[in-house]
Image: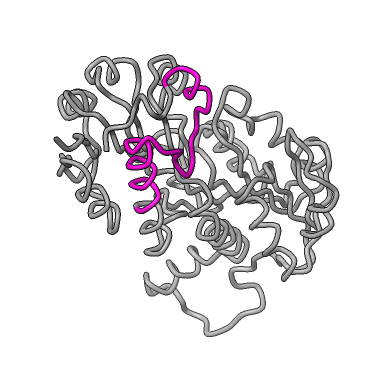
Amino acid sequence: MKPKVFVTRRIPSPGPEILEEYCEVDVFLGEQPPKKEEIRIGVRGKDALLCLLTDKIDRDIMDAALSLRVISSFSVGYDHIDVAEATRRGIYVTYTPGVLTEATADFAWTLLMTVARRIVEADRVVRTRNWKVGWGPTILLGDDVYRKTLGIVGLGRIGTAVAQRAKGFNMRTIYFDVIRAPLEKEKEFGVEYVPLEKLLKESDFISVHVPLMKETYHLFSEAQFRQMKRTAFLINTSRGAVVDEKALAKALQERLIAGAALDVFEKEPIDPDNPLLNMDNVVLAPHIASATKEARSKMSEVSAKNLIAVLKGEMPLFLVNKDVLNIRSLPQVKMI
């Protein structure tokens, strides 16, 4: 008998084909993310779960699937999963880091250039037929990027890829991370380690690339915005709750900083009454930093291969909770 898998949303190829080769696959077919009870119903009697970052996988979900052996997330983040509880139960948790690095770094730069050069405002002027003067010396003046100072918060895979791109703009690139990078890496990518306070004070652009955890929740709030240059821009492609949105809105309204560009929000989709929606000095995107055909296809492949590997009793490509190996060994979870 084949293992049974529940997939919380339709995903692109080749993931479905990989799963169907080895498993009985049940896919939630709704366009919106499934509600908690729908996940509970779907996961009952299943041996594996493939979920998205919009799905909160907690103790209640795990209680509904006592035979669950692996939770494979179609994402680089895993804060939506109660990893500690999964580990306690001997459930393997996997994710898809690395495969979306370049796409996300590209998009961080897309946001940075867009907010600096006021592209959204310019597009709106043209589309609303308000372009009245062919050319003018003070029309929609933006900010230079070339030779400016870029501050990167979190020099992991994506932060490093962002730094690599900054070299083409001849920028001074500084970074802060809780763990300083080796000197060889700093030299290779032309980055300088500084304390967070110094980064806030000296950066013209700040790009955020940290995971969401207790230590990074509201890492950027009113105190941090007050330390930034009034001409600075904040770019966030990490997790919404890393930035205190109320404090950001206030900082933008009071012109404590020049602008912001966000791909992620504390609540997704964004509330229709969120004040950020009415501001010209902020660029907003609907969590699409990894939304390239190539990146999403690779995420699909890796998330499926992670899941199948565990069910084969093999080490998955990317395991979140390595401690689970001491709770339930790979031979014990093998089904294929």
| Residue 90 drawn at (x, y percent) | 40, 19
Looking at the rendering, in which quadrant would you find the C terminus? top left
| Residue 273 drawn at (x, y percent) | 37, 37
Residue located farthest toward the front when viewing the structure as drawn: 331
* Of residues 277 and 165, the one drawn nearer to the viewer in this rendering: 165
Residue 7 in the image: above or below residue 134:
above
Which residue does the image show at 17% across and 24% down from the upper left? 45
Residue located farthest toward the bottom when viewing the structure as drawn: 134
Which residue does the image show at 25% across and 38% down from the upper left? 33
Which residue does the image show at 63% across and 30% down from the upper left? 219
Picture colour scheme:
one colour
Horizontal side of 323 relative to 85 (left or right) equals right
| Residue 152 drawn at (x, y percent) | 70, 48
Horizontal side of 108 relative to 169 (left or right) equals left
| Residue 328 drawn at (x, y percent) | 41, 20
Which residue does the image show at 46% across and 33% down from the upper left? 78
Horizontal side of 298 relative to 36 (left or right) equals right
* Of residues 224 and 335, the one drawn nearer to the viewer in this rendering: 335
Is 24 within the magenta? Answer: no
* Of residues 59 and 124, the one drawn nearer to the viewer in this rendering: 59
Q: Report the magenta residues as a range.
A: 301-328
Quadrant in the rendering for residue 58: top left
Residue 104 in the image: above or below residue 322:
below
Query: How many circles with numbers are drawn on the protein?
Result: 0
Looking at the rendering, in which quadrant would you find the N terminus? top left
Is 309 within the magenta? Answer: yes
Residue 215 in the image: above or below residue 149:
above
Quadrant in the rendering for residue 38: top left
